[in-house]
Image (spheres, rainbow, N blue to C red):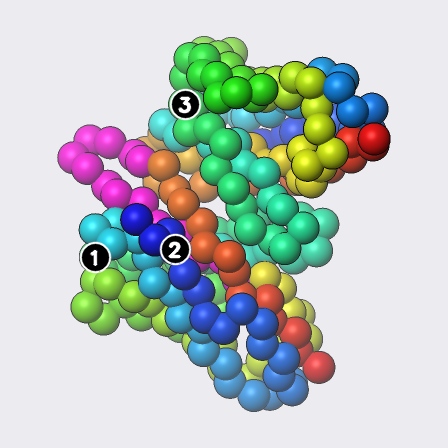
Amino acid sequence: GIQVEQSPPDLILQEGANSTLRCNFSDSVNNLQWFHQNPWGQLINLFYIPSGTKQNGRLSATTVATERYSLLYISSSQTTDSGVYFCAVAESGYSTLTFGKGTMLLVSP
Amino acid sequence: DTGVSQNPRHKITKRGQNVTFRCDPISEHNRLYWYRQTLGQGPEFLTYFQNEAQLEKSRLLSDRFSAERPKGSFSTLEIQRTEQGDSAMYLCASSRRTSGSYNEQFFGPGTRLTVL
């Protein structure tokens, strides 16, 4: 099956700093989603981005499908951005998501 | 759009007991997925339905697990003879499958199962 690798596994930032999270995948995909998991376990949809670039406030994402990677940018980080960020992909021809192991982000005041 | 709901939110049971979880998808979403997440890992796919048809089951889904979606609306996931290794967060997601298109999945808050 498709492999999904996220980096870095852990990230500590000061409030106001910018960061880039990376997601590499091993095969062609028809779906790629970025999620933020809050402390209660809820997965919050950030982006549905199988290709191209999207922006939503301080967050933006880019997927280069031909090179099999996606990037999530967080600018001017806030303490409420803390949590685990997951990348999940659906391999071409399938609809089920395969998740990476996540990036644990801690933003300190 | 009220989002995906799951009940119960927490379940504590003794080893060997049966448990059942319920998921109500976003209305008009014809696809419903079950995932399981253990501590420190990303969610893993268990099974999914399109309307009432169960289209795929993961090898993670042992014969102690059964899922149904009898009228193509809500779904139930039952675990028989629970084991301590079944302790996890069980997540449900739904999406709207349109012809030729794979759509964004939306997740519920999960059911956290603890098997003592």
User: Which residue is disc 3 drawn over?
Assistant: A50
Query: Local crowd at mark 1 within 10 Å, few (<14), some, or many (≥20)?
Result: some
Q: Amino acid at mark 2?
A: Val
Q: Amino acid at mark 1?
A: Asn
B21 or B78: nearer the viewer? B21
Whether label 1 touches label 2, CB < 8 Å: no
User: Which residue is disc 2 drawn over?
Assistant: B4
Q: Residue A104: give x, y in percent of width and height.
A: 73, 37
Q: Does the stretch in magenta take in B33?
A: no
Range drawn in magenta: B90-103
Q: Residue furthest front?
A: A109
Q: Chain of mark 3?
A: A
What label does residue B51 carry, if any? 1
A29 or B92: nearer the viewer? B92
Q: Where B45 sits versus A97, above or below?
A: below
Residue at 20% x, 31% y: name it. B100
Image quadrant holding the C terminus of chain B, namely: bottom right
